[in-house]
Image (cartoon, rainbow, N blue to C red):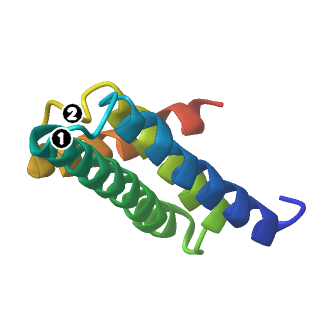
Amino acid sequence: PHSLPLIVLGTFILWFGWYGFNCGSTLGLQDAGEGAMAAQVAMNTTLAAATCGLTLLILRFAIFRKYDIGGMCNGILAGLVSITAGCGNVECGSAVLIGLIGAFVYQGASSLL
C-alpha cells in the first residue's frame, strides 16, 4: 500500500457513508417504529463491520505473524457488504455471525488470488 493513513481514512469515510445508505433505506423517521428500525439497522451495520474487520485482523496475524491494517480495512468493507442485504431483518447476534462469516469468506477469496 502506498499510504496506510489514506487507506484508513477512506475506509472510515466509506463506513460513515454506509450509514446513510443502510439507515436511509428505512425511507423516513415519521414515527417511533421507523426510528427504532433505523437504529437497529445502524447497530447491525456497526456490529458486522467491526466484527469482520477485527476477525480478519486476528486471522491475518495468526497466518502471517504481523498486523495487516490494510487487510483489516478490507475486512471492514467486507463486513459492510455482508450485512447490507439483511441489516433490517436480523438481530444483533446474527449481525455478528454475518460479520464473522464475511471475514472467512473474504480471507478465503483473498488467498485464492
Q: Amino acid at mark 1?
A: Met
Q: Residue farthest to the right?
A: 2
Q: Nearer the viewer, residue 23 or 109?
A: 23
Q: Nearer the viewer, residue 42 or 85?
A: 42
Q: Nearer the viewer, residue 110 or 39?
A: 39
**Does 3 sit left or right of 78 as displayed?**
right
Q: Nearer the viewer, residue 44 or 98?
A: 44
Looking at the image, is 106 positioned above or below residue 96? Answer: above
Residue 108 position within the rendered picture, expressed as x and y whole percent measured from the top left: 46, 36
The residue that disc 1 covers is 37
Earlier along the polypeptide chain: callout 1 or callout 2? 1
Q: Amino acid at mark 2?
A: Gly
Looking at the image, is 69 positioned above or below residue 82? Answer: below
**Does 53 sit left or right of 98 as displayed?**
right
Circle 2 Cα neighbour tier, 10 Å, few/some/many (<14 / 14–19 / ≥20): many
The residue that disc 2 covers is 88
Q: Residue at x 44, y 47 (%)?
A: 19
Q: Are marks 1 and 2 in contact (CB under 8 Å)?
A: yes
Residue 100 position within the rendered picture, expressed as x and y whole percent measured from the top left: 28, 48
Q: Quadrant of residue 11?
A: bottom right
